[in-house]
Image (cartoon, rainbow, N blue to C red):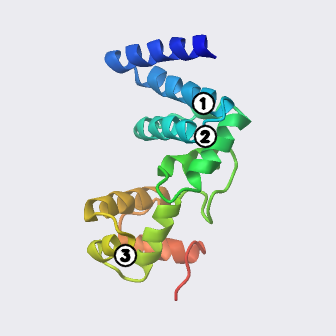
Amino acid sequence: MGRARRFLEQILLSTEADGRRWTLIDSLIQFALLEQAEGAQAAAVAYLTRALWLAANEGFVRVFLDKGEALLSLLRVIAASSHAPAYAGTLLAAAGEVTHDDGLLSGRELQVLELIVKGNSNKEIGDALSISEATVKWHVNMILSRLNVSDRTQATVAALQRGIVHLP
């Protein structure tokens, strides 16, 4: 494994310097799988999380799903985290799995959505979840995108109609 690690490190350094995003993402995924095979779950999750953040903007799917069950198991671990990139749920949905009621929202996004439905402002949501208002705005934008709606009111209606959240 030491030789494979050194090879991957060289690829990672070179792709970061050259800006080759797909190769960088693929290298990070390979590192995640290597760490997982060596029993270093936290390191595997860290590498895969970084790959997810990079891939979300590009919409890369196959580079993840082509890796098979080993990667899907890591995606499940990440999707269950409250700080998960929403893209983990998107990839699991693309693989035919459901991570939450709608298959697309991370745990944190689901928390934010529940507070939106209750009528909380971004500041109130941030205070309730101990996150910044900017982070709340980012989650709100991801929710709107995932639900394919354009505002908080439409998100509330969609969430209630789909049974993602329920009125208190």
Residue lying at 55% horizontally and 76% vertically, measured from the top left:
165
Percent of width and height locating residue 126:
32, 70
Q: Report the side of 42 relative to 140 (left or right).
A: right
Q: Earlier in the sequence, mark 3 or mark 1?
A: 1
Amino acid of disc 1: Glu
Q: Secondary structure at mark 1?
A: helix
Amino acid of disc 3: Ala
Q: Which residue is mark 3?
A: 128
Q: Closer to the camera, 83 or 22? A: 83
Q: Report the side of 151 relative to 5 (left or right).
A: left
Q: Secondary structure at mark 3?
A: helix
Q: Earlier in the sequence, mark 3 or mark 2?
A: 2
Is there a contact, CB below 8 Å, between mark 1 and mark 2? yes
Q: Which residue is mark 2?
A: 41
Q: Nearer the viewer, mark 3 or mark 1?
A: 1
Amino acid of disc 2: Gln
Q: Earlier in the sequence, mark 1 or mark 2?
A: 1
Percent of width and height locating residue 147:
49, 61
Label 3 to label 2: alpha-carbon separation:
30 Å
Q: Which residue is mark 1?
A: 35
Residue lying at 50% horizontally and 71% vertically, measured from the top left:
158
Q: Residues within 10 Å of mark 2 (few under 14, many from 20)?
A: some
Residue lying at 49% horizontally and 52% vertically, measured from the top left:
84
Q: Secondary structure at mark 2?
A: helix
